Amino acid sequence: MAESFAVPAGKAVEPFVLALDIGSTGTRGGIFDATGRPIVRTRIKVDHSFRTNAQGRSEISPDQIVHEVAAVLDAVARPEFAGRVAGVAMDTFASSLVGVDEDDAAVTPCYTYADTRCAPEVEQLRGLVDEDELQQRTGARLHTSCLPGRLRWLKRVEPDTFELTRWWMSIGEYVQLRLLGVHGVALATAAWGGLINRQTIDWDEELLDLLGLHDEYFNPIRLPDQPFTKIPRRIARRWPGLAGAVWFPSIPDGLASNLGPGASDERTMAISASGAGAVRVLGKAIKGRVPSGLWSYRVDRERSLIGGALSDVGHVVSWLDTVTPLPTRSNRNDWFARPPTPDTPVVLPFLTGERSTGWRGDARAIVADIGPGTNAAEFYRGAMDGVALSYRRVVDQLDTVAPGIERIVAAGTIAQLLPSWLTVVANVLDKPLVPISLKRTTLRGSALMALETLAPDVPRADPEAGDTISPTRSWVREYDGRYHRFLELYEKNFG
């Protein structure tokens, strides 16, 4: 995080927010002032990883996460911040699921968004419901990353545990239950799981009936301006820096990563490029139809986050780094400095299945049009071109429901690791792109969400941004042709 944006505690504007971000690689924490600037020397990370296997498992111990959050608070919620921290904000990877018994103990692992073992149940549900009508009602498609299929799968493979479970909740809810003894779920978190009626902003009774559940198995829904205010005294005793602070219900990391880089209104589109990827717009709740390739998750009384997600962005980079040699006189970022050539293959980069826009969880990568001059650089370039072309499929649908976009910002680990690749993205989309250089924008986004309630009248500082990347006509023409080839391959193999 750039020191020029961060601020010493003595010069920071109160009230402060302590933010927590539970991500796929670790649990982070940091303190932000009322303008949304990070306070120097308050950020920390505790590493973790998901337990995975070839059968699609992706889990982590929910109690491990509780201990990690406590360790972060031990390091960050220092006594000198007592009376200055007005709120604790949290975001987590979405959508997660933990089964909890009547004694408030976890009886299942935390199942993550990447667990695909419920794929058969997702297909069964598609035969039982009109998926298009369901999407219009809940804002979500049927997919292994959402809760309907996972709950149905658990009922089949763990019937005894399913019966033992008193509450189904996200990992953020579980952390707050164990630390604070509270029950409540942020509207956005509930919506992300695919079980909320987006018009009534309440649990969808028709879908719960189909799953053999009812709303009493889930926590009460809380809006962003409804923090937990009755905090046990033991919290201030252990963490004096949090004395008097309220706690906000945990939100999804996707919402936080939109707010963090500055995409907080319907004129700004955010492109996220980390392990997974997404394109999102935060604006007024859509009353009409949601395009089939997108989702629309209610955030509060007035707003929805609409967009689409890619399963594989940073995952593609990690895989490519293992199968391509390092260049001898340059680096991989340099491979994006020129337009593609005829030897650059067209790649459908689905390593772990597709989410938006086709929702094919069984999709796998396809490489086409390899030529005699296709080398490691061309192969790497083609695969990452494929990621950019996948973003375009989402943006094309977003343009139909969010036509007033004036600015596109790009943030995330891969955007910073391969900055030249953003030139590819700008030309594939044929839209100017603003790279956000600020790191850990998700952590900042959680703080900003809480500040909407705690300090609504304090102007927010703008995160540091790079120079705008503008499209080049010759590149745009080349990528238009490659996009049509991409769509042709997709239709032939997965249409």
Image (cartoon, grey):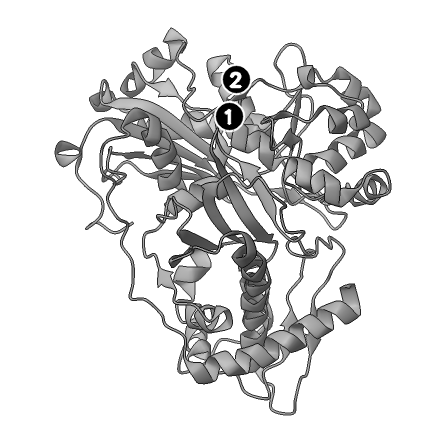
Question: In this orientation, which residue lies closer to the viewer: 375 or 176?
Answer: 176
Quarter where residue 40 is shown: top left
In what element is the residue under mark 2? helix
Position of 478 compared to 328: left or right? right
Q: Quadrant of the C terminus?
A: bottom right
| Residue contact at pointers 2 and 1, CB within 8 angstroms | yes
Residue holding disc 1: 66
Residue 47 visible (yes or no): no
278 vs 369, left or right, is left
What is the secondary structure assignment of the residue under circle 1? helix
Q: Position of residue 45 (x, y in %)?
A: 40, 39
Which of the pair 70/435 is nearer the observer?
A: 435
Q: Where residue 222 sits in the image (x, y, percent)?
A: 50, 21
> What residue is shown at x 39% (from left), y 64% (from top)?
433
Left or right: where 223 falls relative to 127: left
| Nearest to the observer: residue 275 or residue 402 | 402
Which label number is shown at residue 178? 2
